[in-house]
Image (tube, helix red, strand yellow):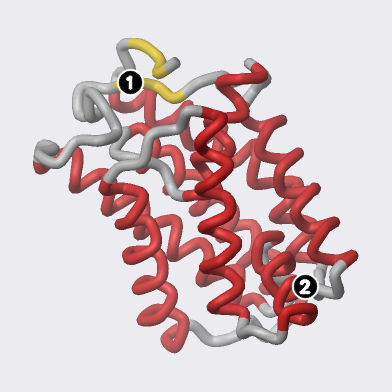
Amino acid sequence: MVKSIPVTGWSSPKPLNFRPRLTTLFFLSFGLFLFGLGETLLISAGIGVSPWTVLAQGVAIHTGTSIGVTTFVVSFIVLLAWIPLRQKPGIGTVMNAIIISATIEFVLPLLPMPASLVLQVVAVVVGILLVGLGSGIYLVANLGAGPRDGLMTGLQRVTQLPIAWVRISIELSVVLCGWLLGGVAGVGTVMFALGIGPAVSAGLFLTGRIAGATSDNT
């Protein structure tokens, strides 16, 4: 199992890098686009949103704010959790929100809702795989993870557990909290919570293998 982020020839030497190479920016953007495309498929499938959206729904119910505002606040709180984990932000942390949001905004209207449960499940599976692959590519770029992925890599570094286990633990904890607060979970939510850990681990492994990883970030 993958236990750390591979380092390739196009990985940035450090997350806080304001002059990255064009190849590094390309792979960062491409990975985030795939991530956003996967999230879009999950939404269009219509059988359950991601665990973090379930949490945002639950918090919104009790605070009276919109899901958009709640999502931003939750992301900010997660970023605060980076401090004790000694996670370092970068331009990828900002681009994460911009590219993924833009992809969902422009692609979602183009995707029809699957006509049958089988197609809905297929859309969720493909979406999870795309999120995993996209995560692997953009994390290897090493220009700063998004709030949730940074929490994952920080906890992995501290615990030294496999990335898949850490991610599954986070997602299950988040969806449970969201559900207890009143958020709505579905089949797709459970599939995402259980599948995203192995998907991210596989994405990191494939990216490192294809790109010829030389070592691992620690």
State the residue position of label 2.
Answer: 58
Q: Residues within 10 Å of mark 2 (few under 14, many from 20)?
A: many
Helix, strand or loop at label 2? It is helix
Q: Nearer the viewer, residue 146 or 85?
A: 85
In-image side of 108 versus 27 (left or right) = right
Q: In which quadrant of the rendered view does residue 110 lie?
A: bottom left
Front disc: 1 or 2: 2
Q: Is residue 198 above or below residue 58?
A: above
Q: In the image, what residue occupies the spot 54% across and 87% down? A: 112
Q: In the image, what residue occupies the spot 23% across and 23% down? A: 13
Instruction: Name the image quarter holding the N terminus.
Output: top right
Q: Position of residue 101 (x, y in %)?
A: 41, 71
Q: If you read the primary sequence from the N terminus, does the residue marked by circle 1 or circle 2 appear first?
A: 1
Q: Residue 7: give its label.
A: 1
Q: Is residue 212 above or below residue 192?
A: above
Q: Position of residue 98 (x, y in %)?
A: 33, 66
Q: Position of residue 8 (x, y in %)?
A: 27, 22
Q: In the image, what residue occupies the spot 50% across and 21% down? A: 4
Q: CA distance from mark 1 to mark 2?
A: 38 Å
In-image side of 102 versus 79 (left or right) = left
Q: Nearer the viewer, residue 20 or 83?
A: 83
Q: Position of residue 14 (x, y in %)?
A: 26, 27
Q: How many labels were placed on the picture?
A: 2
Q: Is residue 213 above or below residue 49?
A: above
Instruction: Name the image quarter holding the C terminus.
Output: top left
Query: Which amino acid, by three-letter code, is at mark 2?
Result: Gly
Query: Which amino acid, by three-letter code, is at mark 1?
Result: Val
